[in-house]
Image: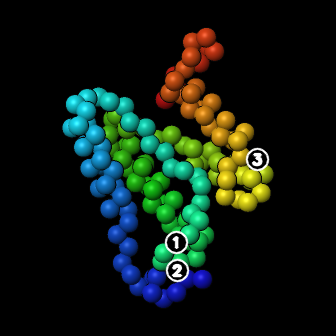
């Protein structure tokens, strides 16, 4: 359960994550010298297994995923060559028994295959398969 200490501490999460993504983006472009390189970002749907803060794991997972998703969204909207792929949303908005193994932590192989096929159709179409780039 949450405690008062968790709520008293200031949260600097979102700006910090956004700044890190922008710095990594700029460093990648500087290092590789390709200003038009396409970058794809996603958020893993796999929940946290533990936390060092003492915060309830469900609350910590929700907080963490919301920060990462918000930062990824802001980053992809602010840079023309950064694109967001919705693997998190695909899993989280699917039927639980279709998306997760019984442990609720590991994504089912058929869901991973669905995500990978969706990704391939959007970003790496194969003409022989009739794929069309939509991303």
Q: Is 72 displayed left or right of 115 in the figure?
A: left
Q: Distance between the residues labelled 2 and 1?
A: 6 Å
Q: Can residue 93 be seen in this view?
A: no
Above or below — where is 48 with respect to 24? Answer: below
Label 1 and label 3: CA atoms lie apart by: 27 Å
Q: Are marks 2 and 1 in contact (CB under 8 Å)?
A: yes
Question: Camera-side residue: 134 or 126?
Answer: 126
What secondary structure is marked by label 1? Answer: loop
Which class describes the residues within 10 Å of circle 3: few (<14), some (14-19), or many (20+)?
A: few
Label 1 vs label 3, nearer the camera: 1
Identify the mark at residue 54; answer none if there is no mark.
2
Figure coloring: rainbow
Residue beneath disc 1: 51
Relative to residue 10, is residue 17 depicted above or below? above
Left or right position of 135 against 38: right
Relative to residue 108, is residue 58 depicted above or below? below
Q: Pointer 1 and pointer 3: residues touching (CB < 8 Å)? A: no
Mark toward the start of the polypeptide (2 vs 3): 2
The secondary structure type at the circle numbered 2 is loop
Q: Residue at left 73%, top 60%?
A: 103
Residue at (46, 82) in percent of width and height: 6
**Residue 113 percent across, percent down from the top left:** 67, 35
Name the residue located 32 percent from the left edge and 40 percent from the top edge: 79
Q: Nearer the viewer, mark 2 or mark 3?
A: 2
Tell me, yes or no, whether the two marked residues, 2 and 3, touch with CB atoms within 8 Å: no
Which residue sits furthest bottom?
4
Residue 98 is tagged as: 3
């Amino acid at each position: 359960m949450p405690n008062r200490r968790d709520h008293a501490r200031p949260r600097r999460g979102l700006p910090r994550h956004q700044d890190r993504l922008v710095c990594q983006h700029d460093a990648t472009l500087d290092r590789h010298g390709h200003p038009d390189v396409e970058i794809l970002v996603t958020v893993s749907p796999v929940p946290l297994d533990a936390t060092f803060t003492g915060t309830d794991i469900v609350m910590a997972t929700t907080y963490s995923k919301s920060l990462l998703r918000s930062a990824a969204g802001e980053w992809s909207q602010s840079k023309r060559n950064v694109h967001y792929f919705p693997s998190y949303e695909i899993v989280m908005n699917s039927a639980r028994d279709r998306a997760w193994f019984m442990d609720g932590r590991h994504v089912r192989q058929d869901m991973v295959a669905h995500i990978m096929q969706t990704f391939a159709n959007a970003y790496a179409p194969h003409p022989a398969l009739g794929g069309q780039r939509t991303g």
